[in-house]
Image (cartoon, rainbow, N blue to C red):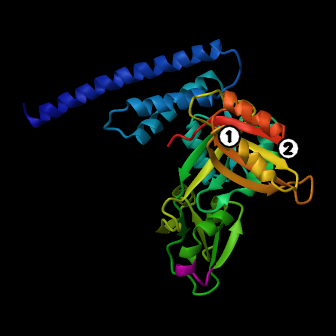
């Protein structure tokens, strides 16, 4: 058989497979419509169900497509099928081109209505008012720690964490590819990005004025209107504003990762691979934090994160944010809550949710 006939035969098989895949995709979409009608509630997004699908795909995937590629493909399939049931509106920290928008797309796909917001607090407000179904906000960076604005909003708003996303963050120096003036150069970025690139900036741009702004996308927007301004941001933002990437991967840590959370009004059910977030506010007295942590050891619960914020109610009182493995409906977690309540401490359950797909 000639190479041309062999190639034509392969292409015929691909065409036949594409027809079968198309038929199966539409069959799946019809089943999604049926599932929506059969639901006992009107909740549009089921993080536990979707996490179970993704984990099963990872376990059964035999290649040659990688797990990341399979997850990316199915994320769009699920997003499209979900849209046949009902419309979904998700807010995020804007403007367009931010890492928060990328996190949103990696969680919800492209078949959703999105709404950029100027601040983390406004993302919470949109969800609380019912103007958006869910919101995406950053909560922690592997290099710079917690995002305090998000922690404060978790205390202030009666919303639930129902999902998380971990995203590898690659920072780029962005601007016009033209000779720059020797003096008066400004580099704009979100304060977290400036901190994540501080060693690189000190080495390669020691004379530049570092200007913190509301988001990296805003920084790139500023650079697009002023040739004396450079920005730190992602490739998507550079493309959106038609700017050049002058240097890439300028973050100080090669493992620089940001964790985002999904906030909403509905609880996520158990998957067997969950995390729970709580905030505990204690009195300013000896051994208060030890008393809070002791039940975790007694119940063999794995703490994955701990940080604190000053309490807004009383001077020198602190609120401790704790993440740990398990779901709030599990027996050991219920025992934990009972012991914490016996301490005369104020406990707020922020939510239980599936662990990030990594």
* Residue 258 image offset from top left, x and y in percent: 59, 54
Give the magenta range.
Answer: 202-208
**Please, is residue 50 above or below residue 256 in the view?**
above
Image quarter of residue 5: top left
Image quarter of residue 46: top right
* 95 on left or right of 7: right
Which residue sits at x=53%, y=71%? Answer: 176
How many numbered marks, from 0 up? 2
Q: Which quarter of the rendered picture does the N terminus lie within?
A: top left
Decide if residue 262 is in sight here. Answer: no
Q: Which mark is residue 239?
A: none
Determine whether the residue tagged by mark 1 lies in a helix, strand or loop.
helix
- Density class for disc 2 (Cα within 10 Å; few <14, some 14-19, many ≥20) is some
Image quarter of residue 256: bottom right
Determine whether the residue tagged by mark 2 lies in a helix, strand or loop.
loop
Is 242 one of the magenta-colored residues?
no
Is 205 one of the magenta-colored residues?
yes
Nearest to viewer (mark 1 / mark 2): 1
- Density class for disc 1 (Cα within 10 Å; few <14, some 14-19, many ≥20) is few
Which residue sits at x=92%, y=52%? Answer: 313
* Residue 221 image offset from top left, x and y in percent: 64, 63
**Please, is residue 199 above or below residue 264 in the view?**
below
Q: Label 1 belongs to which residue? A: 298
* 85 on left or right of 282: left
Residue lying at the far right of the rendered structure: 314
Q: Earlier in the sequence, mark 1 or mark 2?
A: 1
* Residue 141 image offset from top left, x and y in percent: 62, 57
Which residue sits at x=84%, y=42%? Answer: 343
Q: Label 2 belongs to which residue? A: 345
Mark 1 touching mark 2, by CB under 8 A? no
- In the depicted view, which residue is nearer to us: 140 or 233? 140
Which residue sits at x=83%, y=48%? Answer: 281
């Amino acid at each position: 058989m000639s190479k041309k006939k062999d190639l034509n035969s392969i292409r015929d098989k691909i065409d036949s497979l594409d027809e079968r895949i198309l038929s199966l995709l539409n069959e799946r979409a019809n089943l999604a419509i049926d599932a929506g009608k059969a639901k006992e509630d009107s909740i549009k997004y089921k993080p536990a169900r979707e996490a179970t699908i993704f984990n099963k795909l990872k376990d059964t995937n035999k290649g040659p497509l990688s797990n990341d590629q399979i997850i990316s493909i199915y994320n769009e399939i699920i997003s499209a099928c979900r849209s046949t049931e009902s419309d979904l509106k998700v807010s995020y920290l804007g403007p367009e081109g931010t890492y928060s928008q990328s996190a949103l797309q990696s969680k919800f796909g492209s078949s959703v209505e999105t709404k950029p917001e100027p601040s983390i607090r406004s993302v919470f407000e949109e969800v609380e008012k019912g103007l958006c179904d869910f919101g995406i906000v950053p909560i922690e960076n592997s290099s710079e720690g917690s995002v305090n604005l998000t922690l404060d909003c978790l205390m202030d708003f009666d919303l639930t964490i129902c999902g998380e996303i971990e995203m590898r963050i690659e920072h780029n120096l962005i601007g016009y590819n033209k000779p720059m003036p020797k003096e008066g150069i400004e580099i704009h970025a979100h304060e977290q990005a400036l901190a994540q690139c501080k060693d690189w900036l000190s080495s390669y741009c020691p004379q530049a004025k570092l200007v913190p702004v509301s988001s990296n996308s805003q920084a790139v927007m500023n650079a697009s209107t002023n040739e004396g301004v450079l920005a730190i941001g992602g490739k998507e933002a550079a493309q959106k504003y038609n700017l050049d990437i002058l240097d890439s991967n300028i973050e100080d840590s090669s493992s620089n990762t940001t964790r985002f959370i999904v906030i909403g009004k509905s609880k996520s059910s158990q998957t067997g691979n969950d995390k729970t977030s709580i905030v505990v506010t204690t009195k300013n007295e000896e051994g208060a934090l030890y008393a809070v942590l002791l039940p975790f050891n007694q119940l063999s619960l794995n703490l994955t994160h701990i940080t604190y914020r000053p309490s807004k109610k009383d001077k020198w009182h602190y609120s401790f944010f704790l993440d740990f493995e398990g779901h709030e409906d599990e027996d050991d977690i219920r025992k934990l809550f009972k012991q914490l309540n016996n301490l005369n401490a104020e406990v707020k359950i922020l939510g239980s949710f599936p662990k990030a797909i990594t």
